[in-house]
Image (spheres, grey):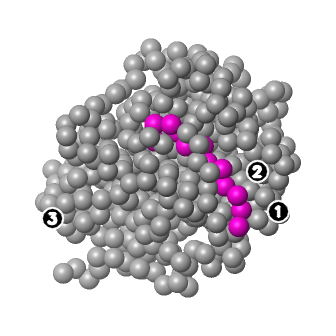
Amino acid sequence: MSEIPYKIYLSENEIPTAWYNVRADMKNKPAPLLNPGTGEPLKAEDLYPIFCEELSKQEMNNDDQWIDIPGEIVDFYKMYRPSPLVRAYCLEKELDTPAHIYYKFEGNNTSGSHKLNSAIAQAYYAKKQGLKGVTTETGAGQWGTALSMATAYFGLDCQVYMVKVSYEQKPFRREVMRTYGATVTPSPSMSTNVGRKINEEFPGTNGSLGCAISEAVEAATSQEGYRYVLGSVLSQVLLHQSVIGLETKAALDKYGIKADTIIGCAGGGSNLGGLISPFVGQMLRGEADYDIIAVEPASCPSLTRGSYVYDFCDTGRVCPLAKMYTLGSNFMPAPNHAGGLRYHGMSSIVSQLYDDKLIRATSVKQTDVFAAAEKFARVEGILPAPESSHAIKVAIDEALKCKETGEAKNIVFGLTGTGYFDLVAYQKYNDGVMDDYIPTDEDIAKSLAQCPKI
């Protein structure tokens, strides 16, 4: 047996006490958010009616490399962090590859995913501001589950708009949210103005994250003492998720391991951005070089087939404009089973890093993703979330390339969570009734044509 253990654990005292803000090291900063009415760059105080004040300041912070994590949040992290970095010895053997494969496992908490890292931070700042509650959207349900846990901890009300197709496909994740006290509404609904408008414009729609965001923002701004919180895309979320990358790097450093390839699934960018931030920071400072791969679903390929333009963050067009790789805010993705990756755009930070060619991107088909997920489950003993399985698919591909070349690369990927609430998806794959929808160029062009001309 190698001297490198199956699981590399950090001690409780090695949990990060400050978030790393990669924007401070970026030479090309992400483009500013714009007011959708005037087209002018927003200031932090412009966001106060929507977001908590401290989170608004974090959203606009391009300068501070490190932001201290409040003690109450660190104490909460201790319930499930540090999370293990696992050497996938069994997968390596199955693939007969000289590559060394590691995965950072974020599923060892009740929410089942990495989302709790930011949910507890956002709930903390809402409580500190004296708010009654928060509203949000959720795709596959991991974010809604995590936020319901965090708000229950701080005694806040939680209102979740869940993408309709996921609401129907994943009823048990919905029930976890309700168990923690959240109100869960399928989106688009008939309870908001924007929901009624979207239902009228797209009758019978399965919904999208963009739709759910619009509804959650309307709900927050129409209730006294409420603010909106988001589980991905925003810079503040990638900041909170940097604990993933900081722990990953610390675990690798403990055994003198230098990663060659780092892989993460990419929907809005929270997991990918959090995992890669410290490594990208090294690249930006000229300290190291890595091959970083963003993996997205072929059904919603914002990086690989989208345009880098200013666009609305939501389908209802009530949120600020962000410059990002996008398929257009009106893009209605197919009802695939990776609900957390079904967003029309990409984080401004990830988009800028991709445009600067510091990272690369690829898209993969749904059936190929589930084939990789089942291979992983059978040898590594964890049933992975469909979102995470996109990274697994490409990690396997990269390991097989090493088999062909004989290179013993160190491959690291993010295992964002577990798939035990995604068994309907596994059932469809096992029954052979899962398909691979890929949007046409015409579909994407039609949606992109409606982006604002900035």
* Residue toward you, 89 or 329: 329
**Could you say which disc has been placed on residue 93 in the image?**
3
**x, y percentage for residue 111?**
49, 62
Q: Who's the residue at 20% across and 51% down the image? A: 400
Q: Who's the residue at 56% across and 53% down the image? A: 144
Q: Please indicate, yes or no, whether residue 242 appears anywhere in the rendered image.
A: no
* Residue toward you, 216 or 256: 216
- The residue where tag 1 is placed is 129
Amino acid type, residue under disc 3 in the picture: Lys
Placement of the N terminus among the 4 image quadrants: bottom left
| In magenta segment, residue 267 | no
Q: Who's the residue at 49% across and 23% down the image? A: 204
The mark that comes first in sequence, 2 or 1, is: 1
Circles 2, 1 touching at the beta carbon (< 8 Å) = yes
* Residue toward you, 372 or 221: 221
Circles 2, 3 touching at the beta carbon (< 8 Å) = no
**Could you say which disc has been placed on residue 227 in the image?**
2
User: Magenta region: which residues?
Assistant: 155-166
